[in-house]
Amino acid sequence: MKKKYNLSIFEKHFLNFGCYITFLIFLTFVFTTSLVAQENPKLESRLVFSKQAGAQSYLKIEGAQVFSIFKFSTKIDNPNLTSEDTPTYAHTSVSAFGIGYERVKSNGLLILGGLGMRKAGSSLIYKKIDYLWKMQYIDVKAGIGYQVNKWPIKPYAAVLPYFAYLYNAKQSIGTNSYDIKASGSFKNSDFGMFMALGFKAGISPYISIYSEYNYILGLQNIETGNEQYLYNRGFSFKLGIALTLSSYTTHKEDVIQTPTDFLAPESAYLVDKPPVKNTPPVLEKKAEVPVIETMTE
């Protein structure tokens, strides 16, 4: 029987971050292509979708690698406690996914919302015993932010308050496992804020990709007791796809565009066309037929 190979923590993190580095290289290629397009009007006309000014709406599908941890504190003030008696929690690597809605206005204002499933938890070694918490939350979030629309790759920042329902929770102590949701050790809900920094780039008239860093700030004590305080904290790296639902351009005349509007000939992508002057038609001159005079007697 072959021995199962378990990845080390370093190898797991290396594989996770390798995916993000590959994504960043791809975005660098998109940005370089956009710069070249500025020198080539024909190519720039094909990339005009990434630089349009105006309000746009997106449906977002995203996944994230989460590094979750607990923040612990206690009301008990015991001067005899040492650093060995105080638990030090460590990050645990988990995942999250979700769907969302985003609206970007012409002035850069972001309006965001979403629904997702997020794993949480932490681990520690206390008095030579391994402790591990594994939890699952269903998140509902909504917030505002700001996006810079000057470049093809658009940086943005946002703050999203969230409310989370505890769907599942397990605790492992050594080799024993316990259902801490059923036992009532943890509260069934949590609330806090997601603070996001990211950037987005269009890869077609109706598909954009984005990468995002999130800081997770839990604001509710998830312990049911009154003597200890435990808060969800952590950070995540997110990748997602944004599907264009509608786009409202801000040219001389307001035109409502949908993804199907971009399925037009190449000439339809040209913007700021020079006006066509109304000139009178030029009449072609007919060739004059020579007249032959006859002599009569």
Image (tube, rainbow, N blue to C red):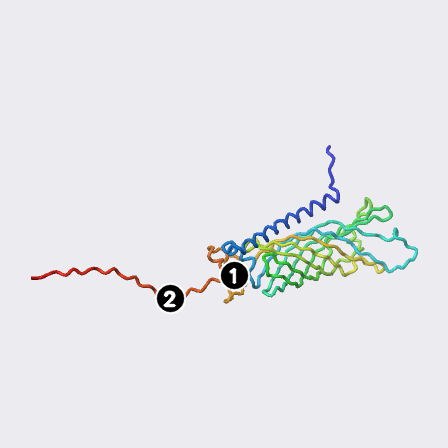
Q: Residue 46 in the image: x percent, y percent?
A: 51, 55
* Cα distance between the residues tagged 1 and 2: 32 Å
N-terminal of the two: label 1 or label 2? 1
Residue in front for this viewpoint, 56 or 17? 17
Which label number is shown at residue 257?
1
**Amino acid at pointer 2:** Thr
Residue at x-position 28% and y-position 62%: 285
Please give the label number shown on residue 90.
Answer: none
Residue tagged by mark 2?
Answer: 279
Which quarter shows the N terminus? top right
Label 1 neighbourhood size at 10 Å, few (<14), some (14-19), many (20+)? Answer: some
Left of 79 or right of it: where is 65? left
Residue placed most toward the observer, 242 or 282? 282
Residue 158 vs residue 52, the one in the foreground? 52
Which residue: 73% across, 33% down? 2
Secondary structure under badge 2?
Answer: loop
Question: What is the x, y in percent for residue 229?
Answer: 82, 59
Query: Which percent across, then down, holds residue 178?
Result: 80, 49
User: Which residue is found at the position 61% from the left and 49% from the top?
Assistant: 26
Give 128 or 251, whichever is nearer the viewer.
251
**Quarter where residue 60 is shown:** bottom right
